[in-house]
């Protein structure tokens, strides 16, 4: 028998991970924007993401829509708990998108559009991290309804995860620029990437420890026998990924650091999945309890199996067409 809730859980997890990686680097460029010299350097940085940035957000729509359709109970519980950071995130993405288009058409106000681009990126990244932290620390549930308050999402832990995601996205953005640009801009990006790499790894360690302290059940998952055998490769891989990232930033080819940064995100996501499975509302509702009726999930899965290869195909094609270095003066005008 096919376990449809499990299939949908993996599909949604994959969509969220793809979104974090793809939209993460272009949000990271927005976060780094004020630190780049105005003029050609900023234009080149923006041109490096111009062909793909809006397509990256397709995966956010897929993740949110899939949660609503496949796990309506989880959607009904999580949305009231996370309304504030998620609405702020969406507003940040709107301002960022508008600034992206208008800065090329309105030279007289370009500094203001650059500021909007930075603030939209920063707010979107920060709020995504805050929502993640609030999700990890737990949602108050009474039966099938949200029992918490309006400000439950705002805690020191959620703010810390928000700042951590900002630093992590900045790492993705910096390593993307190392891969996609040349000359002085690449050197600037490499310097920022080294700083962001140190910050990202420090936050991985800090948040991992804080999570174990906040949710004692996670300690049993990660340190009990024989589970320890299966989870140990993840922290070992994080150590190796950190070494790969640092080596790439100092001695490796330009694309290597970006791949290493992606690996750290994937490993962190896997670690989170190990801690939370099988809950979709942490320690309250499992994926099977929150699932839509089997008929609904089957119907939705057929459509997803048609659309998902198309989305993956045009995404891969866009990145293939616009592969290689971005030259100064080329791109989006």
Image (spheres, grey):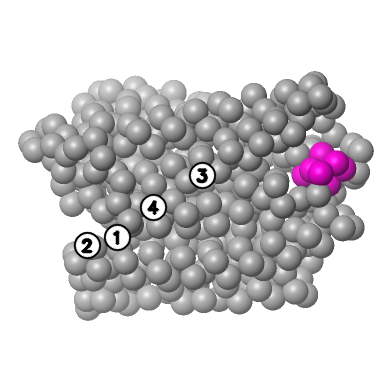
Query: To which residue does mark 4 refer?
Result: 159
Mark nearer the N terminus (3 vs 2): 3
Element class at badge 2: loop
- Picture coordinates of residue 320 (x, y %)? 76, 41
In this rendered view, identify the residue nearer to me: 135 or 179.
135
The CA span between labels 3 and 2 is 24 Å
Q: Where is the C terminus found, in terms of image quarters? A: top right
- Asked if residue 96 is among those painted magenta in the image, a careful observer would answer no
| Image-based side of 289 in relation to 11, left or right | left
Query: To which residue does mark 2 refer?
Result: 215
The CA span between labels 1 and 2 is 10 Å
Label 1, residues with CA under 10 Å away: few <14, some 14-19, many ≥20? many
- Picture coordinates of residue 265 (x, y %)? 51, 58
- Work out whether 27 lies above or below 80: below
Query: To which residue does mark 1 refer?
Result: 275
Tags 1 and 2 touching, CB below 8 Å:
yes
Tags 4 and 1 touching, CB below 8 Å:
no
Element class at badge 3: helix
* Mark whose residue sits in front, 3 or 1: 3
Residue shown at the point (82%, 25%) measured from the top left: 107
Element class at badge 4: helix
Mark nearer the N terminus (4 vs 2): 4
Query: To which residue does mark 3 refer?
Result: 125
């Amino acid at each position: 028998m096919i376990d449809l809730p499990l299939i949908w859980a993996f599909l949604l997890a994959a969509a969220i991970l793809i979104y974090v990686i793809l939209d993460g680097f272009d949000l990271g460029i927005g976060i780094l924007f004020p630190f780049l010299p105005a003029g050609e350097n900023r234009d080149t940085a923006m041109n490096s993401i111009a062909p793909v940035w809006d397509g990256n957000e397709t995966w956010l729509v897929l993740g949110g829509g899939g949660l609503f359709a496949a796990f309506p109970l989880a959607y009904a519980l999580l949305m009231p708990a996370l309304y504030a950071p998620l609405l702020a995130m969406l507003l940040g993405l709107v301002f960022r998108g508008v600034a992206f288009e208008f800065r090329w058409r309105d030279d007289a106000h370009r500094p203001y559009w650059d500021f909007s681009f930075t603030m939209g990126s920063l707010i979107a990244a920060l709020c995504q991290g805050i929502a993640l932290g609030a999700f990890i620390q737990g949602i108050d549930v009474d039966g099938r309804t949200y029992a918490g308050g309006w400000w439950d999402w705002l805690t020191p832990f959620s703010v810390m995860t928000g700042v951590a995601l900002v630093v992590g996205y900045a790492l993705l953005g910096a390593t993307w620029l190392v891969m996609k640009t040349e000359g002085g801009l690449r050197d600037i990006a490499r310097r920022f990437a080294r700083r962001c790499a140190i910050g990202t790894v420090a936050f991985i360690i800090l948040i991992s420890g804080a999570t174990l302290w906040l949710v004692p059940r996670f300690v049993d998952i990660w340190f009990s026998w024989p589970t320890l055998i299966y989870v140990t490769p993840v922290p070992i891989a994080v150590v190796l990924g950190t070494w790969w990232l640092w080596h790439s930033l100092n001695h490796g080819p330009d694309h290597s650091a970006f791949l290493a940064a992606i690996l750290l995100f994937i490993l962190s996501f896997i670690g989170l999945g190990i801690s939370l499975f099988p809950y979709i509302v942490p320690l309250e509702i499992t994926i099977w309890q929150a699932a839509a009726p089997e008929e609904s999930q089957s119907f939705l899965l057929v459509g997803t199996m048609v659309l998902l290869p198309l989305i993956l195909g045009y995404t891969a094609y866009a990145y293939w067409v616009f592969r290689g270095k971005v030259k100064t003066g080329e791109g989006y005008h």
